[in-house]
């Protein structure tokens, strides 16, 4: 009986976690792709990222990381900022839109969660609430292709920006290496704990 109970809880954790990741990633990445397109770079649209299909935005390892470590990431929205007429302004806007929208989602999902009685819906929106803020903070790390790296690149001399963008793929490998040797979970641990406490505070109405 205990085995069946444990398996059931594992399944609940996986399914609610996966659905929560979709709630975190889909609106954020769509808004980001839309913003990049409006700034004059049609790359997201051409590559199918201006889409409400969650599976074009989800990163498999980032999704698993959300469920296991309470932080994670999505597939980076493809952009070639050099195609924008106002390069540095474009980099700044596209780097802050994700974290800002993540904070907005944190507030919206927190309010929704306070009014949910169903256990499974509560778990989905509770996780989506805290992960929205966790991702907002995590994405500001200056590791390519996270938003923090693009924010940093906006202040680089123009001749270095193309080089920085070109080699951001190595940042992904570096981030994965940090995850697998447990450095990223250690770095994020105090942020995750703080955000969980803050989420509980908001959901409980400050009580």
Image (spheres, rainbow, N blue to C red):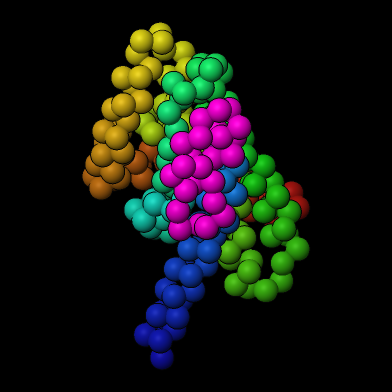
Quadrant position of the N terminus in the picture = bottom left
| Image spot of residue 103 (x, y percent) | 63, 40
Question: 118 above or below 204?
Answer: below
Comparing 195 with 91, the one in front is 91
Q: Which residue is rendered at x = 51% and y = 30% of the image?
A: 41
> Could you say which quadrant of the image residue 174 lies in?
top left
Q: How many marks?
A: 0
Image vertical order of residue 65 relative to residue 95, above or below: below
- Give the residue displayed 31% in from the left and 26% down from the top: 166
Q: Is residue 3 magenta?
A: no
Kindly identify the residue that appears in the image at 25 percent across and 47 percent down. 180
Q: Which of 46/32 is in front?
A: 46
Residue at the far bottom in the pictured view: 1
x and y percentages locating residue 70 in the rendered image: 46, 52
Q: Is any part of residue 123 visible from this angle?
A: yes
User: What residue do we see at 34% from left, 41% from top?
Assistant: 184
* Magenta span: 33-56
Residue 81 position within the rendered picture, expressed as x and y whole percent measured from the top left: 46, 24
Q: In the image shown, does 206 or 83 lie closer to the viewer?
A: 83
Residue 100 figure quarter:
top right
Depth check, front residue: 24 or 93 = 93
For residue 44: magenta?
yes
Q: Is residue 96 visible?
A: no
Give residue 86's position: percent from left, percent from top.
Answer: 54, 16
Relative side of 180 to 138, left or right? left
Quarter of the image for residue 92 reads top right
């Amino acid at each position: 009986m205990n085995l069946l109970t444990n398996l059931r809880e594992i399944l609940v954790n996986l399914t609610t976690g996966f659905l929560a990741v979709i709630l975190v990633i889909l609106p954020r990445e769509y808004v980001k792709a839309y913003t990049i397109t409006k700034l004059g770079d049609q790359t997201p649209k051409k590559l199918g990222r201006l889409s409400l299909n969650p599976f074009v935005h989800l990163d498999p390892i980032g999704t698993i990381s959300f469920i296991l470590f309470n932080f994670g990431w999505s597939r980076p929205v493809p952009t070639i900022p050099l195609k924008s007429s106002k390069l540095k302004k474009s980099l700044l806007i596209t780097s802050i839109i994700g974290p800002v929208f993540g904070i907005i989602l944190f507030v919206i999902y927190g309010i929704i969660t306070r009014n949910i009685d169903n256990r499974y819906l509560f778990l989905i929106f509770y996780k989506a609430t805290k992960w929205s803020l966790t991702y907002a903070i995590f994405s500001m790390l200056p590791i390519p292709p996270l938003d923090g790296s693009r924010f940093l690149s906006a202040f680089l001399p123009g001749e270095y920006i193309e080089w920085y963008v070109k080699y951001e793929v190595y940042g992904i490998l570096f981030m994965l290496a940090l995850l697998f040797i447990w450095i990223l979970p250690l770095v994020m641990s105090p942020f995750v704990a703080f955000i969980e406490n803050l989420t509980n505070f908001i959901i409980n109405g400050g009580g």
